Image (cartoon, rainbow, N blue to C red):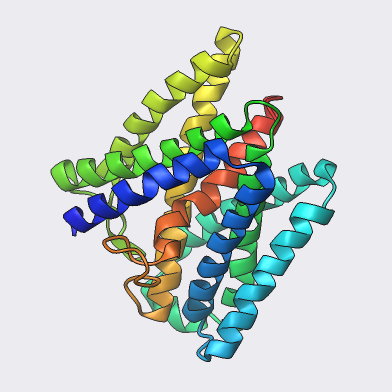
Amino acid sequence: MLKQRVITALILAPLVVAAVLLLPNHYLALIVALVVSVGGWEWARLSGIETSFLQIVYSGSLVLCLVALYYLLPSAWVPGVMLFSVVWWLLVVWRLTRYHADQQQSDRLLMRATEGFVVLLPAGLALVSIHRIHTTGPGLLLFVLILIWSADIGAYFAGHRWGKHKLAPQVSPGKTREGVYGAMASALLCAVFLSFWLAGSLGQSLLIVLLCLITMLASVVGDLFESLTKRLQGVKDSGQLLPGHGGMLDRIDSLTAAAPVFLFGLILLGEA
């Protein structure tokens, strides 16, 4: 499994880096729309939508909404969408802390289908909005991707080496607190780099480091929420699209929470 994960990552990572750094924003937006489309198709199945036609309708509706947000939403409204997303993820934290396995039958198809829009649309908008920040956008988007990737790697190896204490055993039994500590260590290294790049003062540097750590913690919440959604549907992976990684949602689950949180933090810091 690890070998497959590494091979897939080595193929995809250069393509993602090239797209972020070289493509104009509207072309990158098309790629983000494609990712959201695939993620939406997988989320439809996780929601309990069983027919292929309805899965396609659900996925297409997500893309249409994302296109409408990209072309029609005034830029002044983007902070409001990000704030809504941040509040949503805080409510997810509350839900995760209160979840028990005997609650599995309480979820309904309509609620889970609606959650897909709340999860995927702000994340897609955040990615393209970060990318179109004047001059620094592509670099900032690449940074947040590297932040999440490095946190995932740190969590994976720290969890396998030292993991003993379960983080959320009823939601995702494989995740440990030690893995989160490994992710925090990796994120801290990335945060130091970003603080040197953006900050003009010690106070600004500390705020940037704090933002990176909060973004990393948000990524854990995104990961856990997708794990909960899969558990409610009784499946291990969202799909089989990416060898060693599962489906598209399994690859972007951390980013669905991290991207809106990171963009909202940049807005508060005056960097977006």
Counting the numbered discs, the total is 0
Residue 263 screen position, x and y as percent: 63, 38
- Residue visible at 69% across and 48% down? 26
Does residue 142 lie above or below 103 as drawn?
A: above
Q: Quadrant of residue 187?
A: top left
Residue 170 screen position, x and y as percent: 33, 66
Quarter in which the C terminus is drawn: top right
Residue 226 screen position, x and y as percent: 45, 64
Would residue 3 be found to the left or right of residue 239 on screen? Answer: left
Would residue 164 be found to the left or right of residue 196 on screen? Answer: left
Quarter in which the N terminus is drawn: bottom left
Relative depth, front residue between 179 and 126: 126
Would residue 123 be found to the left or right of residue 17 on screen? Answer: right
Residue 74 screen position, x and y as percent: 85, 47
Q: Is residue 217 visible?
A: no
Q: Residue furthest top?
A: 201
Does residue 22 lie above or below 232 as drawn?
A: above
Q: Is residue 154 visible?
A: yes
Relative depth, front residue between 187 and 25: 25
- Residue visible at 61% across and 48% down? 28
Q: Residue furthest left?
A: 161
- Residue visible at 39% across and 65% down? 227
